[in-house]
Amino acid sequence: MKKIFLIFLYLSINPTICNSNFILLSIIKKIIGENKKNLVIGVIDRLSWIQVKPFFISYIKAHFKNCDCVIFYRGIKRKTLNRIRSLGIITFKIPKRYKRMKINNVRYKIYEDYLSDKLDKYNVVLHVDLRDTYFQKDFFKIYKNKKHFIGLALEDGNITDNISSSWMKNQYGIEIYEELKNKTIICSGTIWGTVDKFFELVKNIWKEIEKKSPYKYSIHDQTAEAYLIYHKKMFNDCIITSDIYSGPVMTVGLSNKNFSYDPEDNLLNSKGDIAAVIHQYDRKPNMVEIVNKKFINISENSILIDLIANKNNEEDYIFLKYIICIIIIIFIIIFFSRRIYLKQKELKKIIKSKEKRKGYKKVNILK
């Protein structure tokens, strides 16, 4: 036992071995992963289960890996809340202090508060409008190796659009409107990015909303976002955009074009890829029909079975990674222990050899 302790002590303090360990531990880290989760985040305000069912059922069917889905709610029935929680969704009640505020505005403050002590927990964050969004596949796979970015969904139109123009004029005045009127509409219903950039953006959107008087309904988060991106030029060096036709996030509300589908009724972008996130589908009758068929009319029991199976598969995968890690650690211990043992053996031989020589010299001196 004493020898084992000494071996571990030697492994801890020896600079050469520490450097080797650092390399090997980096390899192990790659095998296990960073252990950071991705996050889907949103709010529900006075919506029924039928209104939000496509979002939650599509989230489960898309089989998101290593992901939390966190929802903040107010004004929903207990039955709806229980159904949401039964799917493994994390829920929090919106604090009463925000009850007078428009949900589309206050959500940024809620996100800021929630993420402030979790910046080390998450990797990529996706914020979505729940009422008119559904998933077709795991969104986060697309951005697996992307670092420090903010993602914006573009709509089919510019700020001269009637609603967007009135929002901009009322919120920032004619001068700012004239500067930005030809810019493409950025949709605030879907925003994503690495947690650091996402946190920075929602924090600044909230500052703009608060500055413009948060208790008035004339303030719009989408206008504040456009002001920060286009006028203040925030995140210029790290913006990723997804337009309505070619990106992984398709915001279809303002489009008059016909869309293509695969045999399983997945909406395809212009590249022929299955888009990960579809937003504003409720403005298109044919899309509503497809969503009803795929998600509204589906049995919730079958989804729960699918959820359990997916969870078991994910746990098996994580277990396998840890087994591999343990094997590598054992190999490291054996490898370095053997090296230490051989070095000690060699050292003993040298000492014995020196002692023999000393003894031989002493004998000669006595003679």
Image (cartoon, rainbow, N blue to C red):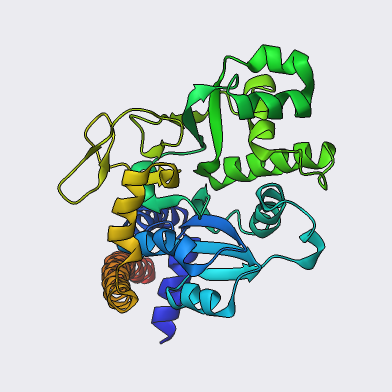
Is residue 350 visible in the rendered image? The answer is: no
Specify the quadrant that holds the N terminus.
bottom left
Residue at 68% x, 20% y: name it.
231
Farthest bottom residue in view: 1
Residue 36 image position (x, y, % from top left): 47, 58
Left or right, residue 195 beside residue 10: right
Residue 14, above or below 228? below
Res 189 quadrant in image: top right
Is residue 135 visible in the rendered image? The answer is: yes
Residue at 59% x, 58% y: name it.
43
Q: How many marks?
A: 0
Res 314 quadrant in image: bottom left
Residue 225 image position (x, y, % from top left): 64, 33
Left or right, residue 66 beside residue 208: left
**Along the line of sight, which residue is nearer the eye, 141 or 287?**
287
Residue at 45% x, 73% y: name it.
88
Residue 365 image position (x, y, % from top left): 38, 66
Left or right, residue 346 beside residue 59: left
Farthest left residue in view: 263
Residue 171, above or below 126? above
**Along the line of sight, which residue is nearer the eye, 27 or 133?**
133
**Along the line of sight, which residue is nearer the eye, 116 or 1?**
116
Residue at 63% x, 46% y: name it.
199
Specify the quadrant that holds the C terminus.
bottom left
Farthest front residue in view: 285
Res 344 quadrant in image: bottom left
**Along the line of sight, which residue is nearer the eye, 5 or 122?**
122
Residue 42 image position (x, y, % from top left): 56, 56
